[in-house]
Amino acid sequence: MTSNWYEAAFRHVLYPAWETGLRRRHTLAWLQEYQRDQWLSPERIAALQWQRLKRLLEHCEREVPYYQRRWRELGIAVADVRNLDDYARLPVLTKADIRENFDELKAASCRGQLLYKATGGSTGEPLRFGYTRESNDRRTAVMWRGYGWAGSRMGRRTLFLWGGAVGDPSRAHRLKERLYHAAFARRVLNSFDMSEANMADFADAIDRYRPEVIVGYVGPLVRLAQWLTATGRQVARPQSIIGAAEALHEFQRQIIERAFGCKAFNTYGCREFMLIAAECEQRQGLHVNADHLVVELQRPAGAAAGQAGEVTITDLFNYGMPFVRYVNGDLATAATQPCGCGRGLPLLQRVEGRSLDALRTPAGHILPGEFFPHMLKDVPGVLRFQVVQRQLDRLDLALVRGAGFDESSLAYIRREVAKVVGESVQLHCHFVDDIALTPSGKLRVTVCELPAAPPPPPAA
């Protein structure tokens, strides 16, 4: 396990030297601020949030062409937005709005200074967006705070069961990645390589590394836990496990905790904002980072108390390309009771609508649904997509193409899929004008129509 001296040295010497000295980022200053603010009363956090929100709205009205035009067309002036009820009457922002008004969403004073990322398209629509360096530093600080509630501190020995790199990174790039993760006391296992045949390899890797914390996609964590339980295999016990990328349901939490012998924690985030909410030590719900974001749950008129609402988010610090009341496609339910931990941050009871179907192969390979969003986010010209599995040896990939998609894009997709499923599965790609939504208005990215997989054999 990581020695206490390294954790202390990393937190107080190495990471400050890297983040503040070398990279000249203010992550640690923001982290100190967020660590302090979480203990404010709910009323003081709400007041702080409102102050930051009003400042952002004034900036949007002054500098962002899209909001200037849109709000003017609707007769909205920020001076008339006096409380959150007024704010909730502002129009929402959709992925389609962002694509159609990409340049207009950039603040005039920040043009040429933005950084860019693309989402993995877990709703079937990859999205490119811009953000400022300060907002990125703050998001990192919020992540450290939220993961810290589950015991994942800076410099603590952590194993990630995560999506691996796609494409063909150079040897120098791979070496740089290994050194970077080693300095952070991290080990990364590629969950996209997981199959029934190599579960023991993942267990062996955990035993060799002996992590204090495991962070992973929920689906692969559950499948590994089921294999451990069924085979009677035990691994080096971490102190906590953090689930990400999918909602961690209670039955899945029980499976993970029984297999690994430690507490499992739920988190909620998306690439556009990073960590949105996370469980603390009490695990009575997920604390919303309300000092950093505004998270609303839009419920239909007349909805019953406790009914899920559509998640709508505003990042209070991305002044470069602000997303005001952005609808990210998820559903969540608010908690009705405060958490016993004493933090003033509000709670979500649960988050729904993020599970991605896992796909299977005749060789026993189980491919997490996250693979396709992860891989396709970097393919030019992919507007929307959906993978359907109706046969064990076949995957059907429907693609809505845009400018930039060509034969090399298709060859790249075939090559990357073949890397993880081999020759036992045929990939059939076809191009469509659109992809049908579910009755609830969502687009399922991966759909597995196979019968449920049989459980692993019992331990001998």
Image (cartoon, rainbow, N blue to C red):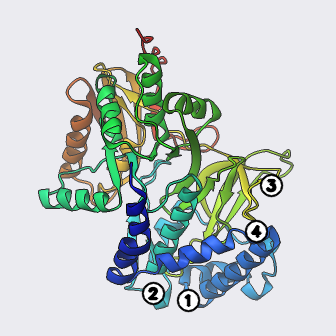
x 37%, y 85%: residue: 112
Decide which of tag 4 and tag 3 comes sooner along the chain.
4
Q: What amino acid type should be assigned to the residue bearing mark 4? A: Ala
Q: CA distance from mark 2 to mark 1?
A: 9 Å
Write down the residue under mark 4.
88
The percent position of residue 176, horizontal first and vertical second, equals 21, 62
Decide which of tag 2 and tag 1 comes sooner along the chain.
1
| Number of marks | 4
Decide which of tag 4 and tag 2 comes sooner along the chain.
4
Q: What amino acid type should be assigned to the residue bearing mark 2? A: Cys
Residue that sits furthest to the left in the current view? 171
Write down the residue under mark 2.
110
Decide which of tag 3 and tag 2 comes sooner along the chain.
2
Q: Taking 392 as reference, is 411 above or below it?
A: below
Q: CA distance from mark 4 to mark 2?
A: 26 Å
The percent position of residue 305, horizontal first and vertical second, equals 85, 46
Q: Nearer the viewer, mark 2 or mark 1?
A: 2
| Mark 4 element type | loop
Q: CA distance from mark 4 to mark 3?
A: 23 Å
Write down the residue under mark 1.
63
Q: Nearer the viewer, mark 4 or mark 3?
A: 3
The percent position of residue 291, horizontal first and vertical second, equals 66, 71
Label 3 neighbour load within 10 Å: few <14, some 14-19, many 20+: some
Whether the residues at callouts 3 and 2 have beta carbons within 8 Å, the answer is no
x 28%, y 62%: residue: 180
Relative to 58, 171 lies left or right: left
Write down the residue under mark 3.
338
